[in-house]
Structure formats: structure tokens, C-alpha cells
Image: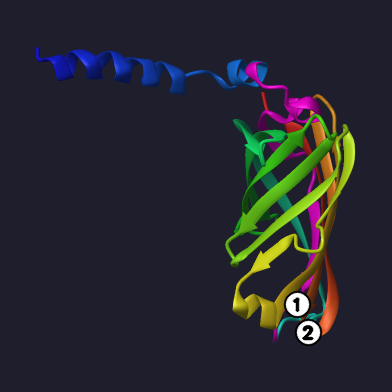
Amino acid sequence: MNILNKITIPLLTTLSLSFALPQSALAQDLDLGPLAPLIGQWKTVEPGVDMAPGRTGSTVGEGGPAVEQFYEIRTFEVAADAVNASDQYLVAIYYKQEVFRTRDDAKFHDQRGYLIYDKKNNMVYNSYCVPRAVCVVAEGTAGSKMTLTAPQRGVAESTYMNEKATTTSFSMTIDISPDTFSYTQTTGLKIYGKDFPHTDSAILKKLP
């Protein structure tokens, strides 16, 4: 065995062990504050309700209120910590949200993001993207129940979306307990030449 192999094998073993740490161990290393109970997988206990703008040619008409019942699966995992501007210390959990229509089990919403906790300033941030070329950051006071709102520059979107279906506002209220998690949210849209409040709400239960 040459000297390179002697160095590489222990290094790979160390890396493998670090990546194999369970989520519970990682959570103990970081102070996740009110976000700690979220670690794990969750599913709706009863259908959630989505109200979105109707498409052209739909039964509710272009821009009409299209109401859809759904179920969702959401997974939260410990991500990492970070320091902003040498001062703001943050810890983050990653989440994956998949939403399916109750009537035919078709997925109609996919969202990936981070919930981020700033203990010093008692703040939580929701930083997420959806595959429509739209990303949002919302922020609010940390707690087991909290309302997170997008600040003035909290939305990034493509030129097309800015012109055709721009997001003008976003706000969500989250209520966290050890085995249930609920939310209501409103996304302000400017679409089809008029304002539309796109709303969602659901109650989820932690899976064993």
C-alpha cells in the first residue's frame, strides 16, 4: 500500500461516519429552538384546502376561485448552521413538501426550502422555491405559533412570472406541537390582470 492509500482510506472512513449520523444526533448538536419538533415526516390527517386562480377555459373561468382538496407529505431534516455578516448565527432545517389532489392522487405542488432559526434575534425564516421559477423568503418572530411574512424584497421570480403571474405578497401562520403541525397561508398574486389571494391550509400529523 502506498502513502496515498494510507491517507485516503482513513479519510473516507471518517467522512462516511460523519454522513451516517442520524437526524436525532444532528438535532442534539444544534439548538433548533421551536423548529426541533418538526424533524421527521408528516402527513395530513384530513384533506387540506387550496384555493387558486382558475385557468382559462376552466369551469370557474379565468381567474375564478378554483377550490381543490388535497393531502400532503412533508419531510423535515436537520441541514446546517451558518453565520451571516460575521454576526447573525443561524441554524436551518431542510424540508420537502409534496401535495396531491385528493380526487385523483395527482401531484400538483412541489416545494423545497429551509426553515431557519436565529436564536439571538428570536426570528424564524422560511426560504423556499417552487418549480415555477419563483422563490420566497418570509420572516417572523420565533415561537410554537408564528406568522411569517415576506418583506419588500422577499420574492424572486422569472421575467415571465413577473409579467404574467407575479407574486405580490406572502404570509403564513404555523402552529407546531409535538405530534401535530398546522398552517394557513396566503400568496398574493397579480394574474389575468387582477389581484387574487391564493390560499392554502392543512393540519398534519407526525408519522411514526
The residue at the point 72 percent across, 22 percent down is 31
In the rendered image, residue 101, in percent from the top left (x then y), is placed at 68, 57
In this figure, which residue is indicated by the disc labeled 2?
Answer: 61
In the rendered image, residue 184, in percent from the top left (x then y), is placed at 86, 51
Mark sitting earlier along the chain (1/2): 1
Alpha carbons under labels 1 and 2: distance apart? 6 Å
Q: Are marks 1 and 2 in contact (CB under 8 Å)?
A: yes
Q: Nearer the viewer, residue 174 or 65?
A: 174
Q: Is residue 153 magenta?
A: no
Q: Nearer the viewer, residue 96 or 9?
A: 9
In the rendered image, residue 29, in percent from the top left (x then y), is placed at 64, 17
In the rendered image, residue 9, in percent from the top left (x then y), is placed at 24, 16
Asked if residue 140 is positioned above or below residue 40 in the image, the reply reads: below
Residue 90 figure quarter: top right
Asked if residue 52 is positioned above or below residue 21 in the image, the reply reads: below
In this figure, which residue is indicated by the disc labeled 1?
Answer: 54
Does 53 sit left or right of 175 as displayed?
Answer: left
Q: Residue furthest front?
A: 86
The residue at the point 81 percent across, 32 percent down is 180
The residue at the point 24 percent across, 19 percent down is 8
Number of numbered tags placed on the structure image: 2
Q: Give the crowd class for mark 1: few <14, some 14-19, many >=20 residues within 10 Å.
A: some
Judging from the image, the colouring scheme is: rainbow
| Residue segment shown in magenta | 29-56
Which quadrant, please, contains the C terminus? top right
The residue at the point 66 percent across, 40 percent down is 84
**SS at mark 1 in the image:** loop
Q: Nearer the viewer, residue 180 or 37?
A: 37
Q: Is residue 35 magenta?
A: yes
Q: Give the crowd class for mark 2: few <14, some 14-19, many >=20 residues within 10 Å.
A: few
Q: Amino acid at mark 2?
A: Gly
Q: Amino acid at mark 1?
A: Gly
